[in-house]
Image (tube, rainbow, N blue to C red):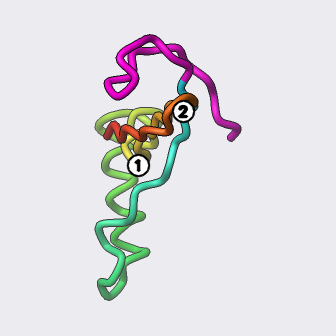
Amino acid sequence: MSPTVEICHCASCGTETRHVVVLVRKTSAFKNEQNGKFKEFISGVVKGWFLGAFVASMDEFSRHRICETCGEKVIEN
């Protein structure tokens, strides 16, 4: 997925500037566990069943906004 550009307020610059927005996949909660892939699959099925497929998949990403002027990075979970 290609990054998108938004215009929003930058706390460092103090003005409205262009920001690049990138979605980054969060690390798995079951990363170092035995049967981690199976547990991650079951967790995804349950989340998808209760929340819906789109909401469950968006829960796996964090949103990073990077100011094009000063380079400040803001992570939104």
Answer few, some or many: residues within 10 Å of disc 1's Cα (few below 14, many 20 plus, some between 14 and 19). some
Which quarter of the picture shows residue 4? Answer: top right
- The residues bearing labels 2 and 1 have C-alpha atoms spaced at a distance of 16 Å
Nearer the viewer's eye, disc 2 or disc 1?
Answer: 2
**Relative to the observer, which residue lies in front, 7 or 1?**
7
Name the residue at 29% across, 67% down. Answer: 29
Identified at 36% across, 76% down, the residue is 31
Provide the secondary structure element on which disc 1 rests.
loop
Q: Name the residue tied to disc 1.
A: 60
Disc number placed over residue 15 in the picture, else none: none
**Picture residue at 46% right of the left edge, 34% below the top:** 65
Q: In x, y percent, where is residue 69?
A: 55, 28
Tell which of 71 and 26 is nearer to you.
71
Task: Please tell me whether mark 2 sits on a helix, a strand or a loop.
Answer: strand
Q: Is residue 40 left or right of residue 68?
A: left
Instruction: Write down the residue under mark 2.
Output: 21
Answer with the quarter of the image where residue 33 lies: bottom left
Magenta part of the chain: 1-18
Residue 58 belongs to the span the image colors magenta? no
- Residue sitting nearer the eye, 2 or 73: 73
| Amino acid found under the numbered disc labelled 1 | Glu
Task: Give above or below for 44 relative to 15.
Answer: below
In percent of width and height, residue 5 lies at 61, 23
Amino acid marked by disc 2 = Val
